Image (cartoon, helix red, strand yellow):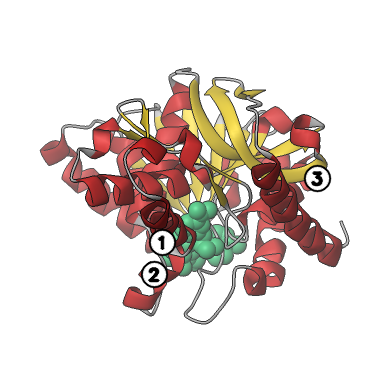
């Protein structure tokens, strides 16, 4: 693909962009922020690391939204990060206002783009962006499940003393306390963890995954996680740009899948050059299905607050 733009040059945006640059995923890479000098300074710093990292992708920093013109992919990390004691829903009103304006600019300057949302609260922000853009749902989706699954994978590897490479995990539902980790579909070299750990241990890892964002906020105090979110974004972008068609859990607009309609929820999707090319429907047990529906219900409440 020719051009990728990141809107938001904060911790997550800059971390993702550096990985995208290092993987040489596009010809033109742009980073936009409202803070004067921030995207320019970080972009230049990254370019000066390029000779060491062996990448020829230069990051153009800008404070002008027009800089995204004709981008093939636009990622949005702009907004406020969660502070200690703040829930993702507390962020809603402020971040909805910021993202609404950015999406209007995407429609104006990059109407053919695929939009990847990162800003929290992720599911409702993704739904809002879908509505404001008027784009097909295949071109508007959010990053959450890739990160939540990576977190569960890292905890499984730590618990069993095995390589993270051999772990796989599936976390569905909303990005927050109501996420739905699926131990049955969480494996080590294809072996379900239900064969490798007792229920108490699985429950402990699942709970840690659910609270993993808050655990990092608790340490950092003035911000939230960005290394793992940045890497998650870069993996999704790579699957789109290289048309890898990886199966990744993403926040997707559902149209009847999993019995849910006109709502955004985390489900496994195939990511390729057209964006979200397919939603993969897996069979869920009644309790898992209930957890997914409850999670979607929470998102619905937030959407109603926004009066879209
Ligand atoms: P950050 O504060 O480091 O960066 C946010 C950046 O957005 C700042 O540089 C700010 O100047 C910029 N910004 C604000 N308004 C803007 C606008 N209108 N246009 C352009 N830029 C604007 O925060 P962060 O740690 O990078 O987190 C960014 C967002 O991502 C937060 O909402 C956070 O909660 C969310 N997040 C989501 C996930 C996920 O899994 N979906 C994971 C981590 C963080």
Q: Which mark is residue 131?
A: 3
Where's residue 215, x and y in %?
39, 70
Residue 291 visible in image = yes
* 84 displayed left or right of 280: left
* 3D distance between C-alphas at marks 3 and 2: 32 Å
Q: Is residue 177 above or below residue 91?
A: above
The residue lying toward the viewer, choosing from 253 and 138, is: 253
Q: Quadrant of residue 307?
A: bottom right
Residue at mark 1 = 208
> Up-down: is 142 above or below 281?
below
**In front of the other: 300 or 64:** 300
| Residue at far left of view | 52
Label 2 vs label 1, nearer the camera: 1
Tell me the CA gap for discs 1 and 3: 33 Å
For marks 2 and 1, the one nearer the N-term is 1
Q: Confirm whether residue 35 shows in the render.
A: no
Q: Residues within 10 Å of mark 2 (few under 14, many from 20)?
A: some
Q: Nearer the viewer, residue 149 or 5?
A: 149
Secondary structure of residue under mark 1:
helix
In front: label 1 or label 3: 1
| Earlier-in-chain disc, 3 versus 2 | 3
| Dot 1 beta carbon under 8 Å from ligand 1 | no
Q: Is mark 3 within 8 Å of ligand 1?
A: no
Instruction: State which quarter of the image contains the C terminus.
Output: bottom right
The label number, if any, that marks residue 142 in the structure image = none
x and y percentages locating residue 178 in the rendered image: 62, 58
Q: Are marks 2 and 1 in contact (CB under 8 Å)?
A: yes
Q: Which residue is mark 2?
A: 215
> Which residue is located at x 41 percent, y 28 percent?
238
Q: Is residue 13 above or below residue 289?
A: below
Q: Earlier in the sequence, mark 1 or mark 3?
A: 3
């Amino acid at each position: 693909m020719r051009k990728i733009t990141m809107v938001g040059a904060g911790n997550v945006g800059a971390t993702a962009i550096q990985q995208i640059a290092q993987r040489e995923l596009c010809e033109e890479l742009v980073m936009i922020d409202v803070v004067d000098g921030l995207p320019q300074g970080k972009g230049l710093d990254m370019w000066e690391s390029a000779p060491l990292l062996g990448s020829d992708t230069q990051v153009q920093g800008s404070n002008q939204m027009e800089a995204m013109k004709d981008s093939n992919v636009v990622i949005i990390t702009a907004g406020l990060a969660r502070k200690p004691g703040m829930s993702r829903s507390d962020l809603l009103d402020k971040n909805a206002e910021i993202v609404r304006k950015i999406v209007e600019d995407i429609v104006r300057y990059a109407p053919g783009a695929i939009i990847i949302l990162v800003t929290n609260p992720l599911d409702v922000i993704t739904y809002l962006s879908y509505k404001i853009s008027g784009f097909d749902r295949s071109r508007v989706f959010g990053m959450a499940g890739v990160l939540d699954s990576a977190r569960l994978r890292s905890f499984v590897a730590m618990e069993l003393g095995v390589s993270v490479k051999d772990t796989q995990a599936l976390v569905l539902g909303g990005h927050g306390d109501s996420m739905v980790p699926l131990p049955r579909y969480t494996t080590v070299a294809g072996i379900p963890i239900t064969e490798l750990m007792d229920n108490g241990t699985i429950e402990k890892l699942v709970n840690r995954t659910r609270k993993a964002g808050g655990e990092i906020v608790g340490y950092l105090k003035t911000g939230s996680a960005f290394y793992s979110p940045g890497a998650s974004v870069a993996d999704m972008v790579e699957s789109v740009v290289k048309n890898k068609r990886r199966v990744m859990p993403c926040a997707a607009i559902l149209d009847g899948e999993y019995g849910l309609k006109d709502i955004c929820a985390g489900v496994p999707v195939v990511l390729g050059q057209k964006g979200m090319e397919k939603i993969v429907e897996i069979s869920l047990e009644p309790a898992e299905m209930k957890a997914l529906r409850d999670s979607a219900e929470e998102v619905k409440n937030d959407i109603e607050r926004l009066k879209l």
